[in-house]
Every structure is written in structure tokens, then in C-alpha cells.
Amino acid sequence: MQNGRPLRKPLALPPQESMAMIYDLILTGGTVVNHDGEGARDIGVKDGRIAAIGDLRQASAGETIDCRGLHVLPGVVDSQVHFREPGLEHKEDLETGSRAAVLGGVTAVFEMPNTNPLTTSEAALADKVRRGTGRMHCDFAFWVGGTRENAGDVGELERLPGAAGIKVFMGSSTGDLLVEDDEGVASILRNTRRRAAFHSEDEFRLRERLGERIEGDPASHPVWRDEIAALRCTERLVRIARNARARIHVLHISTAEEIVFLEQHKDVATCEATPHHLTLSADDYLRLGTLIQMNPPVRAARHRDGVWHGIAQGIVDVLGSDHAPHTLAEKAKPYPASPSGMTGVQTLVPIML
């Protein structure tokens, strides 16, 4: 949504009208990256909208910015952010999170449902839309959490104004958002029409391996939440989706094995990668400790390389930040009392460039 309204398409003008118009702003001389490739183009802006793209050297504007030597890119969509409002505003809120987004080149966000209260109902979604309208600096939509309690309603919830779709947590999560069993997941997928998104870690294996956590040692985080937990859950998820004749989106892929598996199931599953799984490895726990503690974890370098392979081969469909802020005091708690999550909405674009 754009200030609470549907998004509008940029205005496209014929060349002669482009010359006649007086623009508010012209970005001139830059290399513009667009859907049809890169090229030397100017951009004319009128009333806050892109009004023309092309050769505008003969046009006039209230302000002109010389972009020679620079690349000019469209703003990107970050499909996974946790802006913490309502209920956790001491970490961040919709206004500050969206401000960070636009400073980093992100012009639209899909925000996650694990707030307080959880975004699992029409009323909770409407409250978030109301909170964001007029306060958020970028376009927005909100994921609705899929649960056992609302499984019969997800088909209606996913189509409500401001809804990005349905998000399901199959690994440890907040409150009633956890849906760890096959039948619970199937009951949601039988009622969705859009592609539902999933946090894919096998909760049963996570419970079995709690003893692998070592007090004060964040490097034990990927030992506990190991690659088998991720792969096993993704395999289960694809099987459930096929049986339900549904399509799915697997968030923050973190293992080389999942990339190999999902390559064979692109007809059912799309997937997302994050910058931290593409740039960090388990070796970095020694230096950064709980600052890089997240779910699913940063893993051994071979998994980082495997996710890059997924990017290069077109197996990964989406890059998202999984922006999930905490205070430094919270992150400084000794593992495993330290919360999982890292910031990223402001650094998604520059890191990937």
C-alpha cells in the first residue's frame, strides 16, 4: 500500500511531451538500471512520481542532480522484515524501521506477524495498516500468521487490504504461531490460494537437540539448529504442499542441501536467501558472537557457498533481509538467553551490490 492506497504505475510520456514538461527534478547523466537493462538515461520527476525516463537534456526542472559516474536503480522490495510494532517498540517501530528502509534503497516492505498481539486476525491486520498509514516512509504490506486456530480463515485473511499473504512458522516461534506438525501445515495449505511463506526448521529435531546448546557459546547455535533440521523440514514441506496441491515460498534458505533439493521442486516451491547467509559463516561467531545469532543459523562456509550457487543458478528467487532488531543489551546476554535476529533492511542493497 502507498500511504494507505493501492500503488500507482509511473507515468510514461511520449518524447515530445517529455521535452515540453517542466519537471520538479531531473536526475541526469547516470547509468539507469531498469527492467530492460542498463543505459545512459535521464529521469524526470513530477509531483513525487517518475514522469519520464530517457534523454531529457533539453528539458527543464526546478532542480537537477548530476549523476555522471553513478548507477541509478529502482527501489527494491524487502519481502521479510520485523518492525516490532505493536508491542515491542523499544526495539523499533513502523516509522523508524521504514525510515531505515528508504535510507537503504528499499521502497516497499512486507512485515512479519510475530508482534504483540500477533497478526493472526482481520482486526490485528487492520490495526497494523492503520498504524502504518501516514507514518511509514515506504510502501508496505503485512504477513498474516497462519495457525491452527485460523487455518479455516486463511483464504479470506490473505486477500484482505494490506495483506502480503500467509506466513507459517514450523520452527520455534512466538506464542501460537508455531505449527510444527504435518496435519497443521496441511490444514493451512488446503485453504490458501496465494503462495504461503514458511520458516522451515524441524521443531521435533530442535527439541531433541536442545542439549547441544552450550551455555555462553553462540558457536553451538548451528550445532543445535543443524542442517538436518532445515533440510528435513523443507522436504516435509514440499511433500505436504504437493499433497495439498498448493504452492509455497521457503524463507531464508541456509543450507547447500536445501538448494540441491529445491532445484528439483521449482514447480512447487520458490525460495529466499538473506545477505547474512551469503556473507557470513560459522567462523564469524568467534569475532561477532551473539550479534550474528539468528534462525536459521549462520552455518559453515560450505553452506554459504551453496546458497551462492543457488543464486548463480537461478534457484533462489528472492533476496530478503529478515531484518529483526533487538537492543544491544538484549543481544549482549549470554547465549542462549540472547535473542535471535539481526538488522538488515538498511544494508540489504549496499551489501548485495
Image: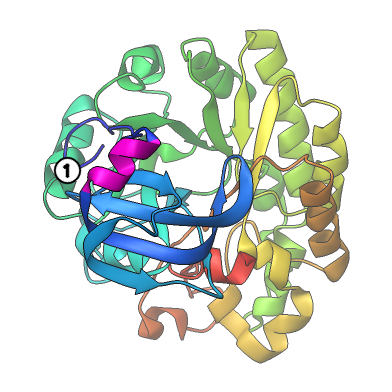
**Of residues 202 and 254, which is closer to you in this image?**
254
Is 18 part of what is drawn in magenta?
yes
Q: In terms of depth relative to the viewer, which is nearer, 137 or 92?
A: 137
Q: Quadrant of the C terminus?
A: bottom right
The image shows residue 136, relative to residue 261, as above or below, that is below
Quadrant in which the N terminus is drawn: top left
Residue ID for mark 1: 3
Amino acid type indicated by mark 1: Asn
Point out residue 170 in the picture as x, y percentages from the top left corner: 57, 38
Residue drawn where x is 16% and y is 37% of the image: 4
In the displayed structure image, the side of residue 108 where residue 303 appears, left or right: right
Q: Residue at x 30, y 55 (%)?
A: 59
Q: Secondary structure at mark 1?
A: loop
79 part of magenta stretch: no
Which residue is at a point 43% across and 69% down the rendered structure image? 346
Are there few (<14), some (14-19), or many (20+) residues within 10 Å of tag 1?
some
In this orientation, does residue 20 appear?
A: yes
Quadrant in the picture for residue 211: bottom right
Farthest-out residue, bottom: 287
